[in-house]
Amino acid sequence: MTELLTIEKVTVRFDGLVALRDVSLAVEDGTVLGVIGPNGAGKTTLFNVVSGFVRPAHGTIRWRGEELRDHRPDSLARLGISRTLQGLGLFPGMSVLDNVLVGAGPLARCGPLATLLGLRRAARDEAALRDRAMTTLADLGIAGVHAALPGSLPYGIRKRVALARALVAEPRMLLLDEPASGLAADEIAELGERITALAGKCAVVVVEHNIDWVMRVCSRIVVLDFGEVIATGEPSDVQNDQRVIDAYLGVPA
Amino acid sequence: MNTWWTLTVGGFASGAVYAALGLSLVIIFRATRVVNFAQPALALLSTYFAFTVNQVTGTYWLGFAVAIVAGAVLGALSDRLLIRPARAHGELGSVIVTLGLLLVVQAVAGMLWTSEPRSFGYAFDFRGLFSAANVFAVLVVLVTAAGVLLLFKFTSLGLRMRAAAFAPEAAALAGVRVGLMVTAGTALAAAVGALAGLLAVPPLLYPTVLDGIFVYSLTAAVIGGLDNPIGTVIAGFGTGIGLSYVSGYLGPELVTLAALAILVVVLSVRPHGLFGRGLARRV
């Protein structure tokens, strides 16, 4: 298995507060990595530092062997990394299809100039992206609502729209920030199956509070506590790790 | 009947101007989700550039083109140099900066070109009840509105601009260069604002010439829903006609009051404007 993402000894500080301390981890192609830990353990900060929203004080982040230095969030999608945000982060005044089309933007081969000039290849390009967006919506079972505004849809469906927007560009790695929060039990189970199926095509990193679900869906787990990695391994190893039990699980699962 | 007809046609003509400046407010709101009070200031500066080019070269259309390009450049500069640094301190910060810019630009325009009214010509013959110049203004507004609608609704550039304004973080993660989109939106809005200035100013140009027009355009844009180019154009013409009745039947001194009254009534009945869809505002 090839390593897609390699994080080495990354430290992040906010005004003297250490959010991440010497965190190292690797994401291998085709695997599902779960990142768990109590609130404030640094899970979302980890995503933010990979996404380029936050700069590490020191440490390196490598994507497919190449170091990401001063990378910007808007360059991430072109590298092949997609991320969903905690909550939804949908564009409220835009239809479901338009939301997903924005996510398909990095696949566009024609610039805005070609579009404004009304060139034929720009029209073909746009039509291809539209098809791709509709296919992605259909894969997630929500093609029927493509014309709706997100605000008019139930939370579970909106969550799927956010996932569609992240998937439409066919990423090599998908970062999911609390994808199961706010979902009903059957939706959570379905999401698990979907992620397992995705793992054939891309690597998935999941930050989630629902421990039982994470243990079932993920092939590896990283446990953060106070910004430090306190355990790494397969779900069964992590579940039985005494430090993890003390820090987070409270009672043996 | 004759008075009524004169007032209606005259109101329709001035409504075109309100619609044009209203459109520039819609563009900037769509691109930044902030109401930009510097809009008339940039339009004013652009029109003064047109005035100077007219005087030097003697051709109206060269000044016209210069004003629109100048509007776009001034818009981009105001975003990069002033509004963006202020945005870091929240939405209110950037609104206040745009207000400040309005005052500074008016003062600077007075220093450079004096506060004396300068004569500024029409694009076409302005004589008659509904003159060639009026026809031109209406056509310009309709074409601009159609362009804005097409841009935001049917092009990926427009989609990205709106996405960047609605949810900057999510847009960036989807590969949208948020800062670039905001600057492009501000530039486009200022270019349309310059166009509105060119239509609104004749016959006389002076530093506060656009103040009243800005109030009426803001009324039109808010009634139109701020997010809706077609609604704003309809509201712009409606405001023009309505205020023309007020001016003709009740007296010109009541026009500003009437505009504010319309604004208050519409907003209390429909807080998102007559044509707005009631989007959640960013918190």
Image (spheres, coloured by chain):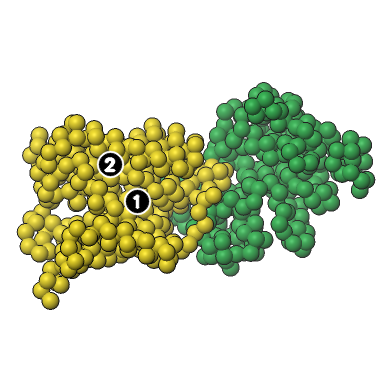
Position of residue B17 measured from the top left corner of the image (x, y, whole percent):
23, 55
Position of residue A87 measured from the top left corner of the image (x, y, whole percent):
64, 51
The tag earlier along the polypeptide, 1 or 2, is: 1
The chain to which mark 1 is attached is B
User: What residue sits 59% from the left and 27% below the top?
Assistant: A69
Q: Nearer the viewer, residue B203 or B137?
A: B203
Against A214, is A93 above or below? below
The chain to which mark 2 is attached is B
User: What residue sits 19% from the left and 31% below the top?
Assistant: B111
Circles 1 and 2, Cβ within 8 Å, touching? The answer is no
Residue tagged by mark 2?
B41
Against A26, is B4 above or below? below
The amino acid on which the numbered mark 1 sits, given as a three-letter code, is Leu
Visible in this render: residue B247? yes
* Disc 2: CA contacts within 10 A as few (<14), some (14-19) or many (>=20): many
User: What residue sits 7% from the left and 39% below the top?
Assistant: B58
Visible in this render: residue B187? no
Q: Which mark is residue B25?
A: 1
Q: Quadrant of the N terminus of chain A?
A: top right
User: What residue sits 92% from the left and 37% below the top?
Assistant: A242
Per the rendering, the colour in which chain A appears is: green
* Disc 1: CA contacts within 10 A as few (<14), some (14-19) or many (>=20): many
Q: Which mark is residue B128?
A: none
Element assignment for label 1: helix
The amino acid on which the numbered mark 2 sits, given as a three-letter code, is Ala
Q: Residue furthest bottom?
A: B1
Q: Quadrant of residue B9 in the image?
A: bottom left
Against B181, is B266 above or below? below
Per the rendering, the colour in which chain B appears is: yellow
Q: Nearer the viewer, residue B271 or B71?
A: B271
Q: Quadrant of residue B145 in the image?
A: bottom left
Name the mark nearer the viewer: 1 or 2: 2
